[in-house]
Amino acid sequence: MMESQHLNAIFEFFLCIVGDWYTYVLTGIITLFFIPVVVLILFYAVAVFLYAHKSRRRGHYKDREVWSEHFWNSARLSVCTFINLLAKYWHAHDVVGLENIPDKGPALLCIYHGTLPIDVYYILAKLQLSKRRRLKVVVDHFLFRLPGLKNLLEVFGCFTGPATECVRTLRKGHLLAILPGGVREAIFATDEYDLKWNNRQGFAKVALASRVPIIPVFTTNSRESFKVVKCVQGIFQKVYETTKIPLVLYYGGFPVKMTTYFGPKIDYDLNMSPKEVSDLCADAISNMIKEYQRTPGTVIGGLKDRWLPQRTKNL
């Protein structure tokens, strides 16, 4: 009888441990897949904030159905301040080489496309707050198809092209960000941080036509904060190549260390072909990856970069 009671007690204790373990693991998995949804919710929260700003102040700034260019300034600064704080506390975000960004005049920023390019938002906020410069960003068409985000994207200078609009933007003296790898690089690049440009030369043609400096930009651990589920990646890639619909299953939100490096401007000649200019940019970013990014990239490595002391590299 006593022996049976002991066995029952041991069995109940075992079930308690297993049950708690199962709960903890399940909670962790749900959290990892929910954080990317939180990022989307933040997008919509900002969109609602901008709508409220527009509704409250429309009477002061609208003249003949045209919004004043200063209408969004205060709202934009508020959002950039929030993004800057998010970058600081979530990813301990730093920038190196900010002096390579001109204080005035045009420049084309050629940026490596991370898995979920939150580093681009960090860069946008940093340039707005530190240099009082707005960064225009070329984005994929599908972002404008997301309901309710069109105004948000336009307020922060996002547009889909074409090349003529990019040239016009640069000739007006703006900073322009282009991510040549696009969605393909975001979803299908590996932990080796390989470039997936597929011989894209449009950004090089834009630079040659507008005669502006090209600045290579890379953010460390931009593939480690958010990860892509690998087991369905092959199926999603076939869908993307056929339909150009970017299906992806994200997880993560890991607080890895992120440092954005602005390289010195790329020395190119106006007599070069677009392919030659594109190759120069690819080489510049590849060299930055070799110098600043541990490969293959891992979440553990990104966390070590943040919390273990190490010698900082500078451009």
Image (cartoon, helix red, strand yellow):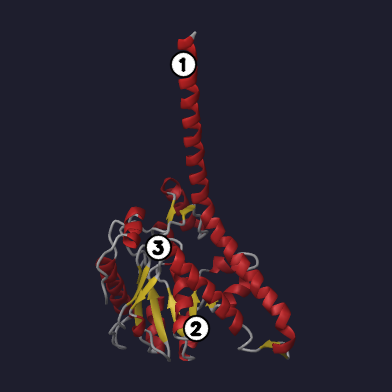
Q: Which residue is mark 1?
A: 6
- Which label was assigned to residue 302? none
Q: Is residue 66 visible?
A: yes
Q: Secondary structure at mark 2?
A: loop
Look at discs 2 and 3 and give the one toward the viewer. 2
- CB under 8 Å between discs 1 and 2: no
Q: Kindly identify the amino acid type of the residue bearing the numbered disc 3.
A: Glu
Which residue is nearer to you in this view: 245 or 115? 115
Q: Which residue is mark 2?
A: 134
Q: Secondary structure at mark 1?
A: helix
Q: Quadrant of residue 106?
A: bottom left
Q: Position of residue 281 (x, y in %)?
A: 31, 76
Lower position in the chain sequence, tag 1 or tag 2: 1
Q: Position of residue 152 (x, y in %)?
A: 60, 73
Look at discs 3 and 1 and give the one toward the viewer. 1
Q: Quadrant of residue 143?
A: bottom right
Look at discs 1 and 2 and give the one toward the viewer. 1
Q: Residues within 10 Å of mark 3 (few under 14, many from 20)?
A: many
Which residue is nearer to you in this view: 10 or 122? 10
- CB under 8 Å between discs 3 and 1: no
Please give the name of the residue rendered at 68% of the width and 74% of the height, measured from the top-left corner.
51
Of all residues, the one furthest to the top in this rendering is 1
* Cα–Cα span, label 3 and label 1: 59 Å
- Which label was assigned to residue 185? 3
Quadrant of the image containing the C terminus: bottom left
Which residue is nearer to you in this view: 282 or 244? 282
Q: Is residue 185 left or right of 145 when viewed as pictured? A: left
Q: Secondary structure at mark 3?
A: helix
Q: Is residue 139 above or below residue 184?
A: below
Q: Residues within 10 Å of mark 1 (few under 14, many from 20)?
A: few
Q: Quadrant of residue 225?
A: bottom left
